[in-house]
Amino acid sequence: MARIGVFVCHCGSNIAATVDVKKVAETVGQLPDVVYATNYMFMCSEPGQKLIQDAIREHNLDRVVVAACSPTMHFRTFSGAIQRAGLNGYMLEMANIREQCSWVHPDKAVGTDKATDIVMMAAAKTRWSEPLFPREIGVTRRALVIGGGIAGIQAALDIANAGVEVVLVERSPSIGGRMAQLDKTFPTLDCSGCILTPRMTEVAQHPNITLYTWSEVQAVRGFVGNFEVDILHKPRYVDASLCTGCGECLTRCPWKKFTSEFDEGMGRRAAIYRPFPQAVPNVPVIDAEQCQAILSLRENPERDKVRCGACLKFCPRKAVDFRQQPTVGTEKFGAIVLANGYSLFDPAVYGEYGYGRYPDVITSIQLERLMNAAGPTGGEIRRPSDGHHPRSVAFLACVGSRDQRVGRPYCSKICCMYTAKHAIMLKEHDPHVQSYVFYMDVRAGGKGYEEFIRRAQEEYGTAYLRGRVSKVYPEGDHMVVMGEDTLLGMPVRVEADLVVLATGVQPQPDADAMARILGISYDGYGFINESHPKLNPVESNTAGILLAGCTIGPKDIPESVAQASAAAAKALGLLSQPTLLGEAMTSWVNQARCAGCFSCEAVCPYHAVERVTLRDGRRAAQVNEGLCKGCGLCASVCPGKVITLRGFSDQALLEQMNVLLLQPGERIYARNSL
Amino acid sequence: MPETVFEPRIVGFLCNWCSYAGANLAGTSRIQYAPNIRIIRVPCSGRVDPLFVVKAFQSGADGVMVLGCHPGDCHYRDGNYHARRRFALMHRFLNFLGIDERRLKIDWVSAAEGKRFAQVVSEFTRQLAELGPLSAISGQQAAVSSQPAAVSQT
């Protein structure tokens, strides 16, 4: 027989005002197995907890029901209290008679009746409670950072500086990310490269950081503290251990007319290239689809002489290797920081802006490349159609932001600021330039941001026109922007040499695939969901997987850096523990009765169900408790009912119904006793 | 017998992460709703075995609610999709049993939807009050079973 103690809390007047707590305790006290029932003003207070502990000792209680607030509020409090009195912390059940009763039912008779039911249900459930012990899990003291943009770089450096080994995986040939593409940063107008490249070099030289560029995370197995990750190393066709980064190959390659991804289509590169001069690592990569030597090997892998081969011929170290193959490495990590960044909205969706049809309609990131001294024009702003310096530039804000029609109702947060930056920089480049900004609202929340917008308007004479643009079309050698000034209530016509679209932030096109690999959830756009938007802003809802930067949502550089440091701190907190406590409420298979249908395996979201062969040769399911999160899907689909979810067993759930649904006179426990 | 207002008995299975938290929010926001529901906390709506629903009806419930996280928001990735599929079939099965399928409600309430929780519960209670007691149909059946389900003894 169980020995249950019931403790009904008044919570001041929060419960006692609408629930007759004394009566509840008396009624529940009459139930079989309930050997002690009482009420008290504040159970969670020090004397309240002592009252419970004393009662456990005095009445030799083995189970405790606390009828008070929600378990989310005080389960830990009371679990700790009964543990200190010698009981297992899971021998506690909380009856939620505050949030789900006294606060919502003002009628005292109704409230008392319902509270009695709730407490009886809890008492019934606790009869099936059993001591649970969370498993101790070892921790691999290494961290993986996915994405080599500024967020990933910062996270990797912070973790590495704390003395923990870090692997940084970046899928492009160089780290640096979006920030490397930028010319200046708002609102300080710092040179982006000047502040970024020292950190990139630091990553490359850090003794605790292993850098894998041109690599991708393919699969993630395991759980917090013990992730096993498959990393694909794509062939670079250049041996990084031999290459000195002299760049001879880049000039010798005869195929130089390919579109540069890094320059966003504004520049050209050879078939062997490095994305930008300060690339880290400074090792070129060959585009296999465009290299004649590699294509010739594809036609006939057996041939001993390749077509072209100029890069190899002129390489002083003979570092080029056309026969490199992709490899996959598996490594173990304790924590993962996801910082895979964002992509930019494709403005071709707005047919009226003519992006893709008119060469002089470009995006902001393209303008950024044109402004950059290391860019395709050497920092001279020349419009794509005829190479002339533009004298009049129109900026269109909110292209792919705050627009339901294109499925982007959110604000991209950075466009107002970078557009103001562009207007300022254009004037700095050429004092004769006049900029026009078509905007919806100027959103400049941030330190020094509003002042920056003011500067763009007042010092640099940028014309801000509030309203959307209806049409952009060419006329003579310039573009005409037709729009509306909603403040004047008048149509506006601006003649511009160059039109710049401030494209919004959106998730990486494969963000959902990445989320599935990691087993974390994402929203309707593809941004990753935080575990709690306010209180756990850098944690995903899978333990051990942390988030930083624009993978969560649009943000600027300082915010990304701050988040990265936060994620690094969380990762370090996790990795500094010798062991972690796993989930206690896990599923358990009674293998003696398991028929081996593996319905459980098919539904388990965590692949926690394993197939094992028993000694008699039968196949049966087994739950890996390290992976199990305790959702109970397996228990509900098991046709033989041989899976038990600890803490939420079939019996514990059914018992609650049984005690509840019988007529008042019949309210006794179900017949099968413990 | 004197005329009394019929008060339906409702068992509600609420997932721990969304709907149970939503019910708590209704409490902290002091949003009143019909008191007929008795809440059984489960980790996930996917934990709810169709057997529980049958058992609830068999042992005297007039209605059963299964509330989970909105599709796509499941704490356990996709448990609520399993629940959705399972109870779509369950509705057809209830009709087969002669139990009006409206007596089983599956719905989604997030942790931020205290008001919606109150609305869903009150609306379901009202609907059941119109449908009347289930025992009127199944007669004696209701009170018979105080046995727990045919579950394994572990």
Image (tube, rainbow, N blue to C red):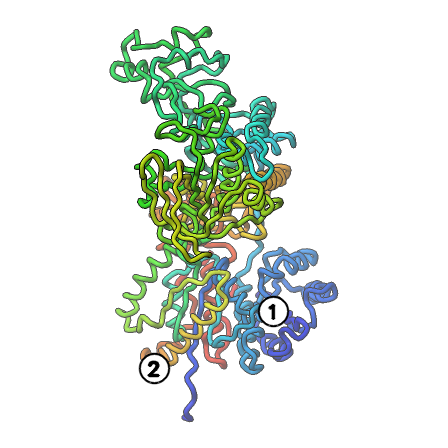
Viewed as shown, does residue A574 lie left or right of A436? Answer: right
Viewed as shown, does residue B106 lie left or right of B40? Answer: left
Outermost residue on the right side: it is: A47
Q: Residue A13: percent from the left, percent from the top? A: 66, 75
The residue labelled by disc 2 is B136
The residue labelled by disc 1 is A67
Say which amino acid is labelled 2: Ala
* Secondary element type, mark 2: helix
User: From the viewer's perspective, is residue A321 above or below residue B2?
Assistant: above
Say which amino acid is labelled 1: Ala
Judging from the image, mark 1 belongs to the subunit labelled A
Front position in the image: A386 or A205: A386
Residue B17 seen in render: yes
Q: Residue A293: percent from the left, percent from the top? A: 32, 13
- Identify the mark at residue A313; answer none if there is no mark: none
- Seen at 65% across and 64% down, the residue is A61
Alpha-carbon span between mark 2 and mark 1: 34 Å
* Screen quadrant of the N terminus of chain A: bottom right
* Secondary element type, mark 1: strand
